Image: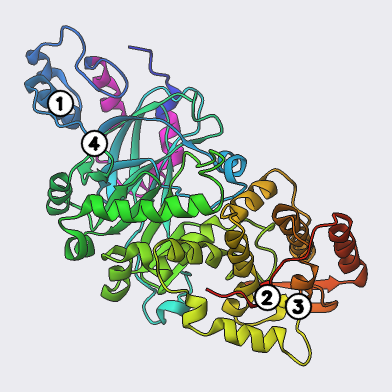
Amino acid sequence: MKTLRIWTVAALWCCTGIAAYGQVASYSTQAITKDLAYFSDWTASALAEGFKSKQLKTFSSPLMRRLAEQLDEGTYQSRYLLNSYKPVASDKVLEKHLKLDNGYSRYENITGVYLEQGENVVLVGDLHGREVGLLIPDWMRQPTPGYKPTQDPEGWGLKKQRIALHEGVNVIYVEKAGNVYVDYFADDPEIAPAVTIHFVTGRVNGYFDAETQTNEDWKHLLDHAVGPVMDVKTRYMQLAYPVEYLKKFRYNEGKELAEAYDKIMLQQYTFNGAVKYGRIPPKRILARVNFNYFMFRDGDVVAFLGNEGTMKSALGPDIYTDWGVNHEIGHVMQMRPQLTWGGMTEVSNNLFTMYVASQAGKPSRLGKSKNYEKAFANVLDAAQKPFIMCVSDPFEKLVPFWQLYLYAKRKGYADFYADLMEHMRNHPDKGRGNASINNMYEFAKVSCDLLKTDLTDFFEAWGFFVTGKFEIGDYSHYTFNVTPEMVEETKRYIAGKNYPKPAEDVTRLTD
């Protein structure tokens, strides 16, 4: 066995904090380290060659003696407790694939292990110089007592504990019991080494891998879960939902649940060109439960309220066509700032939502909710035309962007947005913050180029070319100074291509 470096024990004290200084240790690092001599490696994955049962009497650590007894008897169930973990692709890889800077799961390295509060023993093999840790999120965090859930002073975000790991013996202090995940990301995931981790004091919660397990496996996992939340690993997503609601809405249908989410993802990846251009990233989007708000997207990706109504939307039979689920995933997929400049946060995501709904054969929300009529009245036919980004209703603002897809589709060019986003991925953005509005004029130019059509009149009619200084509230505040020079430069670019005008009035297209 490779010699265990002495600093591993010393490093323990800086990463355990409360365990080291706040209480009497339940587990002796020195005793565990000494007993590792009876095992084949640092992670105690097997007994050392030539091990004899009588040596059990000489163990210093009761914990390691029990482990050795089970290994000696062949009764140790290591499936989840002892595994090697490859790194998950970093956000740098995500940016390279899709020009998205975040939004995918931080918890994708699922262990299936549940750690109780207090001291726990984790054995770690060779880290190969890589930074590796553990994450223990509080999936079931409740709002702060005395406050409305939406006004929680702790915010709506997911709280978590991160614990750094070192090679050899790690006696860690878990602040709150929960599912544990390996925090190991790399810019070179294809060649980065795996790390072996053994949760000696862990409990098996398990997780469902929809691509390799059956619905019978799924039911067994739900029936034997030790924690309140079960992880589901699909091809494109990770789900972390309460066992209670998984049993209520999908007890017999774990694979169908996963397939519904993957169907959404495949459609959204089709719309943004990831399928066409081979850009589906080796990462998963996370959908989780929360207890503060109906549904939202934040730094830990998409969250759905843990009540029966919202959980039915997130878990029930109509996930694929559910507007809210598609809308929140669309927030992850929207490109910033090239298709999501100031004023577009609740617009560009709904291009994805509209696309999935159209592929599912659902009636157009823009038509059903009379958004076309309202947009026509408030923009096209307005006595004083507003700047398009000042239109307050995001569905009215969505109309011209969706009309471009309808027009492209009528021309037999359903890949319009796929190609447009691929162009954006291959070219730098035109500005951020208050300068992000420049991306709108680049959008107009590229749209004309891809459609081989002079759409100047279309953009004029929809208020893209209204000049002035505009204050835009869109989660952040933006001040856009749209000058006549900006507009004229865009018009000159389009005119210089000598594209034909559209044969129909694109401003009145509906579905």
Nearest to viewer (mark 4 / mark 3): 3
The residue tagged 1 is 65
What residue type is disc 3 on?
Ala
Q: Amino acid at mark 1?
A: Arg
Secondary structure mostly seen in magenta is: helix
Q: CA distance from mark 1 to mark 2?
A: 76 Å
Q: Is residue 70 visible?
A: yes
For label 4, the SS is loop
**Mark 2 or 3 closer to N-term?**
3
| Quarter where residue 86 is shown | top left
For disc 3, the marked residue is 461
What's the residue type where badge 4 is placed?
Tyr
Where residue 196 appears, as percent x and y from the top left, is 35, 27
Q: Quadrant of residue 310?
A: bottom left
Determine whether the residue tagged by mark 2 lies in a helix, strand or loop. helix
Label 3 secondary element: helix
Estimate the x, y position of residue 459 in percent, counting from the top left: 76, 71
Instruction: Look at the image and give the residue range highlighted in magenta.
Output: 10-37
Mark 4 crowd level (few <14, some 14–19, many ≥20, 10 Å Cα): some
Q: Which residue is mark 2?
A: 507
